[in-house]
Structures are given as C-alpha cells and as structure tokens.
Image (spheres, rainbow, N blue to C red):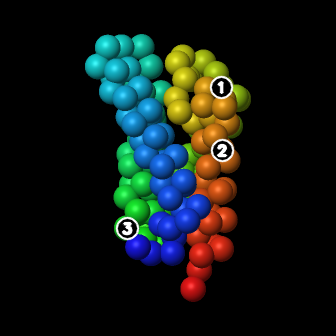
C-alpha cells in the first residue's frame, strides 16, 4: 500500500468513495427522471461523480500525479460552478454537487480538495 493510501489517507479514500456513490446516484436519478428541467446542472453532477470516482481510484492505487490532477480539477470545478451558481442562479434551476460551493453537502466539496492537496503534499517523498 502506498503512503498516500495508508493511515489518514484511508479516511480520505472512504470519503471520496462515499461522495462517488452520493453524487453518482443523485446524478443518475436526476438524469433519468428530469434531465430536461436542468440538463447543465445534472450533467455537472455526473461530471463531479466521475471526478470523485477517479480520485477514489487514484488515491487507492497511490497514483499521485493522477490524484493531483483530479484534485485540481475538482477544486476548479467547485470554485467555478460555485461562483457561477451564486452570480447567476437562474442558470442552475436545480443544484449540482458543486452549487454554491457544495452548500447541499455541507460545503464538504469545497474543503475536500484542499484536504486532499494537503495530504498529497504531506506524503511527498
């Protein structure tokens, strides 16, 4: 097991795994039942789920570069979608995982990539 997937890294993997399931299930239901109501929001939720799945796998396998890239994509997504949803709420008739910086998920989507980046930096060889 690599250093990034051991110790507290396991908790990070577990949280990303949980977010993969939560975001993926939410996006699947939204896309299957009401995609026409908010296609952008639901597509972004599906994208967030894909990023979380990628991060879970990258952290589990100890793929440091892939995890770093995915964490940066996640952080950019949270900041861009969060800001866009605050500035133009009409463009997001329904929430995404990253709307209002992850408000619907207790702002964990905003904090999680920062924790992940800190963990990767701390575990650097």
Q: CA distance from mark 1 to mark 3?
A: 39 Å
Which of pointers 1 and 2 lies earlier in the amino acid sequence? 1
| Residue 101 in view (yes/no) | no
Disc number at residue 110? Answer: 2
| Contact (Cβ within 8 Å) of mark 2 with mark 3 | no
Density class for disc 1 (Cα within 10 Å; few <14, some 14-19, many ≥20) is: few
The residue labelled by disc 3 is: 61
Categorize mark 2 by other alpha carbons within 10 Å: few (<14), some (14-19), many (20+). many
Q: Nearer the viewer, mark 2 or mark 3?
A: 3
Picture coordinates of residue 68 (x, y %)? 52, 66
* Pointer 1 residue: 88
Residue at image position (36%, 14%) is 34
* Numbered circle sitting on residue 51: none
Q: Element type at marker 2?
A: helix
Looking at this view, is 92 or 100 the one in front? 100
Q: What is the x, y in percent for residue 77?
A: 56, 46
Residue that appears at 55% across and 65% down = 7
Q: CA distance from mark 1 to mark 2?
A: 19 Å
Identify the residue at horizontal 61%, vertical 26% (top origin).
Answer: 104
Q: Earlier in the sequence, mark 2 or mark 3?
A: 3
Marks 1 and 3, the one that precedes in the sequence: 3
Quadrant containing the N terminus is bottom left
Q: Is residue 78 visible?
A: yes
**What element does badge 1 sit on?**
loop
Location of residue 83 by image quarter: top right
């Amino acid at each position: 097991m690599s250093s990034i997937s051991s110790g507290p890294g396991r908790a990070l993997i577990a949280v990303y795994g949980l977010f993969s399931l939560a975001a993926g299930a939410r996006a699947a239901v939204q896309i299957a039942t009401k995609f026409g109501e908010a296609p952008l929001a639901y597509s972004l939720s599906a994208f967030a789920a894909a990023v979380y799945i990628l991060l879970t796998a990258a952290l589990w396998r100890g793929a440091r570069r892939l995890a770093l890239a995915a964490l940066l994509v996640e952080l950019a997504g949270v900041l861009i979608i969060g800001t866009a949803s605050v500035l133009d709420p009409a463009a997001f008739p329904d929430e995404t995982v990253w709307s209002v910086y992850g408000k619907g998920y207790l702002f964990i989507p905003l904090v999680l990539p920062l924790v992940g980046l800190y963990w990767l930096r701390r575990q650097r060889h």
